[in-house]
Image: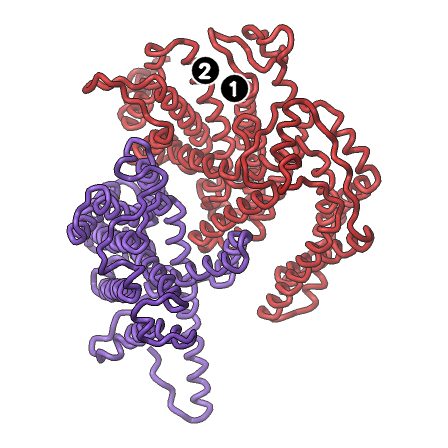
Amino acid sequence: MTSFAPTRASLWSRYRLVAVALIAAVAFPFIVGLLSGQSPAAVLAGEAGNAKFLQGLAIEVFILALYALSYDLVLGVTGLLSFGHAMFFAVGAYASGIMLKSFGWPFWVTFIGVLVAAVVNALLFGLVLPRVKGIAFALVTLGLSSVFFIVVQSSELAKYTGADVGLQGAPVPEWIDTNVHRFRVYLITLAALTIAYLIYRAIVRAPTGAVLLANRENEERALSLGYNTFWFKLFALVVSSLTAGVAGFLWTVQQPIVTPQVAGLGWTVAALLMILIGGVGTLTGAIVGAAVFRLLEYYLERWFGGTAPVLVGASYIAIVLFLPYGIVGTWRARTVNRRQGLDRLRRLFGIRARRSQ
Amino acid sequence: MTTTTRPTVSRRISNALKQNRGRAAIIAALAFIFLSGLFTMDTGDWVITVLRGLAVGAITFLVASGLSLIFGLMDVLNLAHGELFMLGAYVGWTVYVRPDTFMDMALPVALALAVAFCAPFLAPIAGRLSLSVGASRVVGVVLGVIGFLGAVWAFRRFPLSIWDLEQFDKTPTSDSIALQQGVQTVPEPAAWTGSAVVAIVVLILGVLAIVAGFAVVRYRTRVPEPTNARNLIPIAAAVGAVVVLLAFGDPMTDWLYSISTTYRFFLALVVALAGGFALGALIEIALIRPLYDRPIYQLMMTLGLGFIVIELVREVWGRPEFSMPKPALFAGTGDGCPGEGLGGLFSGCSTVKFLDTRVRMYNEVFIITVGVIVLVIITLLIKRTRIGMIIRAGVQDREMVEALGVNVRRVFTMVFALGVGLAAFGGVIAGPALGLSPEMGSRVLLLALIAMAVGGLTSFPGAAAGAVLVGLLQQFVIKAGSTGIPLPWSDQPFQPSPSLVPVSVILLMIVVLLVVPEGLYGREE
């Protein structure tokens, strides 16, 4: 659970972790370049090599992390079990693909269009919000996203969505072409992820976030305290849909292919796996989970080939059994023990114990 | 009967209608869709559409019934249910088309079972060790891994005569085609790789290590139960099976090849039901039970299990779809076929002429009959037996049943096993009608989930009704794809393309959940 921020904390102590992670992420391609014998200038120019390849993988991780983050707000923080989250991502991906390729709209207009589509989509989910709760909400959202999944694949709309092949080669402006300016795209996706994470953290720590958490823990209680939880849930859905829509937009821009796969149940399950691996409701867990998910999938496929899916499934079951609250969640639960142990050690040597938080 | 205190019949009906306005509206709308077909299409077409809908409903019901019992009793949404349905179909196919492989597999499985049933006898030893939590886990995992590797090593040395996925004329697909044409070749019996005694001993030791690892973790602090003579019965049965298989394996295989396919089909049904039951019990004990406090992780567990089953099936049986020939009882084509009317049902023909149309004996008549029989049996089980009483009580209030001193955990295992057994059984039933493919599970699971939601998530009769409605609606929409639905605002009839068919069923679910969130049969909480 995220604790509320102390009122008078220095800027450094508030953004310590983010700053360190950001510096490490920016330095990462150059370090890889140096290790594999490429000069920083070559890495900047985007020459083919290990650094460029790993940047491509990292871009996918950042976009998936953005997507997992948006699911964590809905499921982990607000406690809405939605099985249709892939639709949030797919609407972004398909809207940008259709507007760029089928309509030929300019890049920035497309971006605005994606945001509008995302808000409309969140309102659609919001329509069913007052009627159904719990598993019924999960099934209705699953139904909505399955309808979307089937409709984009239908032959009736093949002119716009490319039926079951999807949209190949959406025209992307040259300045954001991932093959030419890989490092630039890397920075853009990193920036998008960082901004989204900071906004989400601010939301969760603000009074609004407290109401969202209260809704997750006990909706009746929150209602009886006088909060109209509907508006808060709708707010969470809109924010989440905007984030996932931007993630889908970035996905289309960097691939630049849209396949129906991103609208299927498998894509929702991917988000669920990511936040379960990282830890539900922890926000940082979504980012860690996305990294573990994508890298596990990629490297198991590369090392073991055909048997990889079995190993992926087995490692998920192992994670569920041995890391009960996800990586970040288990880490946080253990931190308390570790702190107590350190304090005992300090007392043993006559040092005053640090004030525990 | 008119009394002054009770309202009249018409008043009672109108009250019930008022309270159930949403349900009445939905049922009226569906009835309108189904009955309007009577006027827009031929009687024969209508009959066949209804029968096909009922058959799809029967298969959906076999999956949805287990799903709904499991969800109602223990709040577990088993997303691997569709994949277990598919696994049942593949295992049934093996018994049916390649009994030699089945007999070869039966030997190591019976041997492993005989050893695994010894777990209670290891409890006193495990309890005596008094390890710490961490140590017992480490020891358990190490023993399990060593045992697993040993068992796999030994298993590969058993005489398994399976197909060769690399060569087309030796794949499951070619076996299916051969049996369909009635030319079945009996494959050569396989030989042991290396010494039979070494393989058997290593397999026994390996499974023993796995069981010991399990016992070390499970019985760490528990006071061991006194060993009981009843534990000996399953061990004796499994050992007996091993001895019989070792002694008479080859003659039994020849005999299985010589009997009619009808008997082999019923053997496949029994094997799938029993195997599904055992597998379900194993899954509940080993994987679901540790996670009752963390429902979302249970979802993830069952999903992961589903992926593993799909990949396993692809590894063993290969990727392409293949068919399962219909049993001889429903495949007759000779003189006097197709049969006429009700008498034709017993003529052994593959099709029967009935109300201006040709009804396929297997796809329509047999599947619907099986669905009805299973419905009756399960209903009797729930309404008339002691375990059914516990299930009904558990669905309503689990804590209360536990507080009354009923061993609910045991009932959980039974119900999960029953659900998986029914799904596997349904897989074999569906095999000859739908064909086998690794993707068949997820399609049925979607239909079953929708049926469950339509009928009320925790209600067993609701699951049955939902399955029938879903099946009927799906078939009527498929029919509309060829005839077209007249639209009032355009003179071009709307013909939904085949890929749009599932949308109709999903829309039904969304509408039902929005109008009556607790489902057609559910109760408001």
User: Residue sitting at 41 percent across and 37 percent down?
Assistant: B457
Task: Indicate whether A88 appears above or below B55.
Answer: below
Callout 1 amino acid: Glu
Please state the chain letter of the residue tagged with numbered disc 2 in the rendered image: B
Q: Label for residue A187?
A: none
| Secondary structure under the numbered disc 2 in the rendered image | helix
- Picture coordinates of residue A57 (x, y %)? 38, 62
Please state the chain letter of the residue tagged with numbered disc 1 in the rendered image: B
- Picture coordinates of residue A239 (x, y %)? 22, 55
Q: Which chain is purple?
A: A
Which residue is label 2 attached to? B48
Work out whether residue B329 or residue B224 is closer to the camera in this orientation and state it. Answer: B329
Look at the numbered discs 2 and 1 and tell me whether their residues touch, using CB distance below 8 Å. Answer: yes
- Picture coordinates of residue A54 (x, y %)? 39, 65
User: Residue sitting at 36 percent across and 23 percent down?
Assistant: B477
Work out whether residue A168 or residue A28 is closer to the camera in this orientation and state it. Answer: A168
User: Residue sitting at 30 percent across and 64 percent down?
Assistant: A182
Label 1 neighbourhood size at 10 Å, few (<14), some (14-19), many (20+)? many
